[in-house]
Amino acid sequence: MLVEPRSGLLAAWGNALLAGLVSPDEAALAIVGEDAVHRVEGLPGEAGPVGLTLALGRLRGLGATGFRVALPVPGHPLGLSGPPDFNARALEAEEAVVAYGVPYGLVPEVSEAGPEGDLHIEVVWRVLPVREAPPADVPSLGEAERELAEALRDATAVLSRLDVAGSGPVAEAAVDAYRARVERRREVLAPGYPPRAVRVLEMAQRVGLLVSVAYENGHGGAVSSSEIAARGEALRPVERVARRALVAAYNAYVEGGEVRR
């Protein structure tokens, strides 16, 4: 699963911009991160792709009052509200941003460019109409925090029981590396987010890391097909909880339909 989804960065820093807590250039720099460039295509009033700074300003001018995140996967349309075309594109990307105050959403299309050995990432955010309706299956911060505490215990227990590599030093090394990266960046979310949202995001990322490392580092002792299937079945609900919590954390600015000021 995505530990730091691009949609989360766009929503978080877009919300900070709308609240007047960061400049347009600061927001754009944080959203692009280690990618080479981000462009926005399909923006009302623009004939072609534009940069993030202009796009965020245009969305604010159109009436956007906040941004929320969707992290859907097959069988779980987390954060989506329609219509079908937007849902399908968001499901293919496994993430999207939905604006409050205007009926638009943004779906990232990620591609690699450049010569072999010097590839870089380019992102085009596709602006599409969205249905103004409650998003699917998004928990409150409090609900997400309670679910995560149990999910973290479950993930550790499952991985240990199945003797999966992700339950030991490999997982801890991945978590430590992520913590070091966060420490360098200092800002886990964007300015203005409540401490509880930061806490929920960090815990969700830890759970997500444990699940990802388990999937990516071989089968450990789960050598039979039945044991491998059991591992996947046990981890799926844990991953679901982590994704729900990520959405709750990024959406804390607009929880309950109102932008925090």
Image (spheres, rainbow, N blue to C red):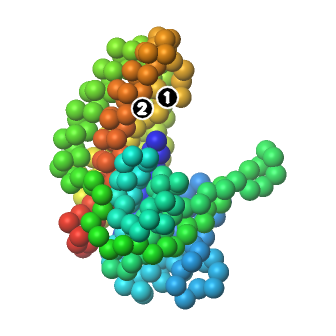
**Position of 185 relative to 51 (above/below):** above
Measured as percent of width and height from the top left, residue 177 is found at 49, 35
Could one spot residue 58 in this view of the protein? yes
The residue beneath circle 1 is 215
Q: Which residue is rendered at x = 81% and y = 46% of the image?
A: 116
**Position of 34 relative to 153 (above/below):** below
Mark number for residue 68? none
| 135 or 43, nearer to the observer | 135
Q: Amino acid at mark 1?
A: Tyr
- Residue furthest to the front in view is 84
The residue beneath circle 2 is 211
Q: Check disc 1: other Cα within 10 Å, few if <14, some if 14-19, many if 20+.
A: some
Q: Secondary structure at mark 2?
A: helix
- Residue furthest to the right in view is 115
Measured as percent of width and height from the top left, residue 210 is found at 41, 30
| 212 or 201, nearer to the observer | 212
Measured as percent of width and height from the top left, residue 30 is found at 50, 62
Q: Amino acid at mark 2?
A: Val
